[in-house]
Image (spheres, rainbow, N blue to C red):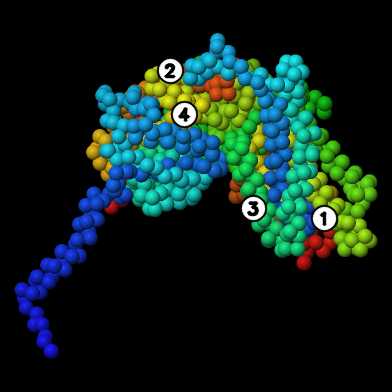
Amino acid sequence: MTLIKPTRRGVIQAGALAGAGMAMPTILTAASHAGYRNAPQGGSVTLGFNVPQSGPYADEGADELRAYELAVEHLNGEGDGGMMNTFMTNGSKAALKGNGILGKKVEFVTGDTQTKSDAARASAKSMIEKDGAIMITGGSSSGVAIAVQGLCQEAGVIFMAGLTHSNDTTGKDKKANGFRHFFNGYMSAAALAPVLEKMYGKDRKAYHLTADYTWGWTQQESIAAATEAKGWETVKNVLTPLATTDFSSYVAPVLNSGADVLVLNHYGGNMVNSLTSAVQFGLRDKQVNGKNFEIVVPLYSRLMARGAGENVKGIFGSTNWHWSLQDEASKAFVKSFGTKYGFPPSQAAHTVYCQTLLYANACEMAGTFNPCGVGEALEGLQFDGLGNGATEYRADDHQCFKDVLVVKGKDNPTSEFDLLEVVEVTPRAQVEYAPDHAMFAGGDLGQCNPGA
Amino acid sequence: MDAILLQILNGLDKGSAYALIALGLTLIFGTLGVVNFAHGALFMIGAFCAVTLQKILTISSISIDPEKKDFLGNPMEVKTPYVESWFGEATGQLIINWSVPLAILFAIPVMLAVGYIMERGLIKHFYKRPHADQILVTFGLAIVIQEIVKHYYGANPIPTPAPDALRGSFDFGVLLGFDPNAVIYPLWRLVYFAFSALVIGAVFAFLQFTTFGMVVRAGMADRETVGLLGINIDRRFTLTFGIAAAVAGLAGVMYTPINSPNYHMGMDFLVLSFVVVVVGGMGSLPGAVLAGFLLGILESFAAMNEVKSFFDAIYLPSIDQIIIYLVAIIVLLARPRGLMGRKGVMEE
């Protein structure tokens, strides 16, 4: 029997070999993942579209998916290019070439948020972990957006928010990996209040019905503050549970409250039902304090306005974008979307289309899919040609700042899509606020997380 | 006082819907012993009968108007409903305008057929199975029906307005000596309450004064003995299921102008209606009606600002959301068989 006698040199050699062997997987992994999660392998990159495919916002989700598919088509060089032809960043044409993103073909997976935070987080998690999605985008609710934004921050992927209007998304719940193109409650209020003052005067008493969740609270706080600054008095704010379907019990007390304006801080089905109740109770035919009783819906959605039918006529609100805008970018998007699908896009479709292009452009600018590089490219980005005029992705809170549309339910619609008319394009300067504004205080972007 | 009167009216109105759905539920439970979680879906199908009739009545011929442009700048398609072409513009518009009341005639045969198919096709196979199985299968059925409706009609609410003549509001307070404009109530909601009272009355009269009704009541009391007398009780119970479906469907049809219908509306009512049945007494028809109105009124009062403030102060927030369940707990603790339930039922 021969025993191998260990020598000093042998131990050192064996140790070096073992060390190199143990280090090998790490070196390979680091190289292939280039230091961030879900680095694309091969010739394609996967985006995760997390939208409500079931539940009350399924129609908005379906419209978002249509817009995402259109954006992917355009990024891959198919179709007419839509707003890729008008998209400008920092004063020159955007970096998108129509050859995917960074030369990789864009593919996508979809998830169903069900407009439930837990379901939305589960579907986003699955897309990140199982499908290798490099970026998550979508949604039609602030509760969901905040939940998924938090998840993406932890997982180390970029979150490009869809339709989320709560101040908190880029306020107390803002995250370094999250970016919002859509406007917010504060901006709606800042745009709407001067128009309301002009239309209805300074001496008004407002009664608020408010959806009892993050969006409703911040929307109510914003519109109350903005109208009070114009001389209005807030008589009462009543929180209504999100599950409410019959608002008659909440509308009835308005009749004898002394208020002459009802502000419905409701969205979606809530808005349709509360507005219908208010009209049925004859509020719009009433005279209070010697003035016509008025109703205001701070956040409009055309898809939802359709559900309220004739009840929306003459009622003021705000919207992020509207298909009737006549700038070249909006016209290009409406033509592209309308030709493919046969009807004009909603504001939800517009915002997610923009978010996809903005993400792709940021990757091209950064030369990487690394969330930290992408985030850096998005921060402070000045862009135009996406339908909202000159826009900036503010670095302090990852909120887009742009003009806001004040709209009114159209009195004589010419088609089933022609429900809202733009009464004023409120300039960006009027809706801008300081990053440390009290309504947005309490949060911290933190550090970007590349996930690896 | 005017605020209280308004909430009583609101309560009666909500109670009407609860009572109609609960009436059908308890009829099915009393006769077939089935806990039907698909009953809310029947209410929703009724509402979509109104939507469907509205769509049928507005099927249109399409012509091109070169003067007008669509959203893409192409010549616009102008739609003219066939009923306007056939009966003249004024008559055609009148028919479309009255589509919701007309949908009652459309919904009755549809709902009877839906009820018949549901009972014969699925539910009869679960008569001898435990209640848990019945709940699972009917709840599953409700979800399937919901998804089918969503597939064809979308997820958004669909406006289905009342006829012009019945829109607007009615100064109810003047009738009772209040100042003008003190108690204004939507006209269609008053119509809904009157309609519900009529349907409830008709169901009771049918069960009370017809031979069919007598057999059904006898069957509810003692199914075996009625069978031993040579009466085919199963056939009658199948028809009873159809009637219960029709009652829920009619409640749905008439509800559409109050809230634009969507695929989920049945689920919104389902749980509340079950609570109504339990509070009223499982299998008790008068109990279902009484509890429906009672809980509707309580729910409306609980939504009053003064009531909410009071309960907030005693650490019971959101009383408007929990009042019905709170009452249910109290009733079940104090009187497990419900307000008008038969002795022995749900008391073991």
Amino acid at dot 2 = Gln
Amino acid at dot 1 = Thr
Q: Residues within 10 Å of mark 1 (few under 14, many from 20)?
A: many
At horizontal 54% and vertical 30% (from top left) the residue drawn is A303
At horizontal 29% and vertical 40% (from top left) the residue drawn is A104
Report helix, strand or loop for mark 1.
Answer: helix
Amino acid at dot 4 = Lys
Q: Residues within 10 Å of mark 4 (few under 14, many from 20)?
A: few
Chain that bears disc 1? B
Residue located beneath label 2 in the image: A326
Task: Work out whether disc 4 and disc 3 sit on a shared chain.
Answer: no
Q: How many marks?
A: 4
Quarter that holds the N terminus of chain A: bottom left
Residue located beneath label 3 in the image: B140
Residue A190: name its quadrant. top left
Chain that bears disc 2? A
> Depth-wise, is mark 1 or mark 4 nearer the camera?
4
> Depth-wise, is mark 2 or mark 4 nearer the camera?
4
Q: Earlier in the sequence, mark 1 or mark 3?
A: 1
